[in-house]
Amino acid sequence: MSEKPVAAKAEKLTAVKGMNDILPPDSARWEWLEDKVRSLMGLYAYRNIRTPIVESTALFVRGTGETTDIVEKEMYSFEDKLNGEPLTLRPENTPGVVRAAIEHNLTYDGGKRLYYMGPMFRHERPQRGRYRQFYQLGAEALGFAGPEVDVELMLLVHQLFANLGLRNVRVELNSLGVSAERQAHRAALITYFSQHLEQLDAEAQRRLHSNPLRILDTKNPAMQALVQGAPQLLNYLGDASLKHFDTVKTLLTACGVNWTVNPRLVRGLDYYSHTVFEFITDELGAQGALCGGGRYDGLFELLGGRPTPAVGWGMGLERVLELIKEQGRVEAAPTPDVYAVIPDASALPITLQTLQILRAAGVKVQMHAGLADSPGSMKSQFKKADGSGANYALIFGKDELTQNAVTVKALRDGIGAQSSRSLADIAAWAPTLQSRT
Ligand code: HAM
């Protein structure tokens, strides 16, 4: 029985703009993707880490960078009602993982390979592939300095995309060197942009001295020519940085990964050093970055930890699923093996018991629900059985039950064929109901 409606109709509430419900059958695609991710992470020996969605605001201000777009304009920040502590819904999870690693001394006995999947929050202008709550898969290798780990992480992405059947994804690389090299490049950038002040938009002028590297990220079409002509960090790299970068490129090639160097790839976060990379598609319009990452050897120290080299990436799962759809791959929606048709409520106890036994034997079962609303309507039950996608209807009819049996009716292959099955030896026939996929 449903409750009586209240006198005045309550106003409908909707999801917050830019934050999406993920509903069946679409949610099955998410589960499918998550399963693929988990098994691949196992093959590369990456282990799951789960950190809180809410962190101290200071973590991102210091970690992600005070003058990044994320920290300047995109964070969902608020004060704890009781003690006024500034808190933020995580816009990304690299600082959270590093904080946890420092807090729990995770790298005390050597490097750790970690991955996570979960929601991130950025107050951006919602559009296709850009949401305010979005799901990121991330992998972080903590405590490893060698370029082979940068490559391992990129191979992980490459393999995942291959396993998902994705095509036409390109890999762009760059190196941001070490701090002293970035400082020299920064000075050159300031000199260069200062000579063209009249061409800088207001945002670029504001960033000229605080974070000139971010000017290279500009989306302003009027500034593209200026940015193209700006000094390139690659020309400021010393021998050690060049060697690291060369090894990354050589190993990627040896593993059959095609790459191009994009000297203007600087990434939108402040913690990077040495290798940075993005996996990009041209098939999703403006939001073509599927995955981005790089080395962040200085972040542990910045967050109060011991110097610890680290490298990782983050991947937008909505974008990956959209590209799979765009490229025409359709996964079959999950269906039950069996739909239980229940002509009469008196059969419910034996029906529920039997269905539990079938499920324990691995048969996926959907029970007809709604007997109270339309008792005895067999036609509508069969219609629902058919719509469920099940291969068989299991009919718990009165006559069969008096003989301790049920009727199995084929709904697809050999449609209409019926047979009686004894409830005394369910284990013997349960496997015949299981689909092979
Ligand atoms: P990011 O480039 O800011 O890096 O984000 C990584 C990926 O998340 C992007 O390439 C994109 O696919 C997805 N993404 C970002 N913003 C949105 C959005 N508003 N809507 C949908 N998808 C989005 C990071 O977050 C770093 N933590 C990556 C990293 C890990 N670097 C080292 N370790």
Image (cartoon, helix red, strand yellow):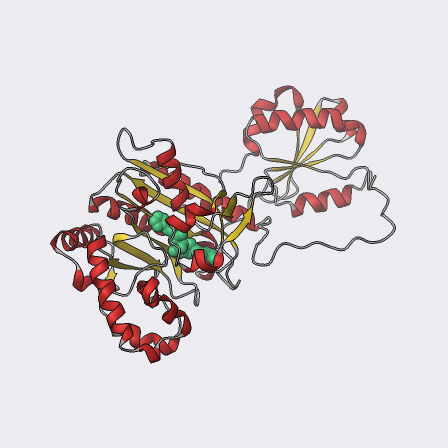
- Which of the 4 quarters of the picture holds residue 80? top right
397 or 172, which is in the foreground?
Answer: 172
Residue ID at (30%, 76%):
226
Residue ID at (71%, 38%):
368
User: Horizontally, is 407 left or right of 56 in the view?
Assistant: right
Residue ID at (34%, 57%):
279
Residue 219 coordinates in the image, percent (x, y) = 39, 70
Residue 189 coordinates in the image, percent (x, y) = 25, 68
424 or 97, which is in the foreground?
Answer: 97
Residue 179 coordinates in the image, percent (x, y) = 23, 53
Please identify the quadrant where the N terminus is shown: top right
User: Horizontally, is 11 left or right of 133 in the view?
Assistant: right
Residue placed furthest toward the front: 83
275 or 167, which is in the foreground?
Answer: 275
Q: Is residue 424 above or below residue 315?
A: above
* Ligand 1 lies in quarter: bottom left
Residue 419 coordinates in the image, percent (x, y) = 65, 32
Residue 283 visible? The answer is yes
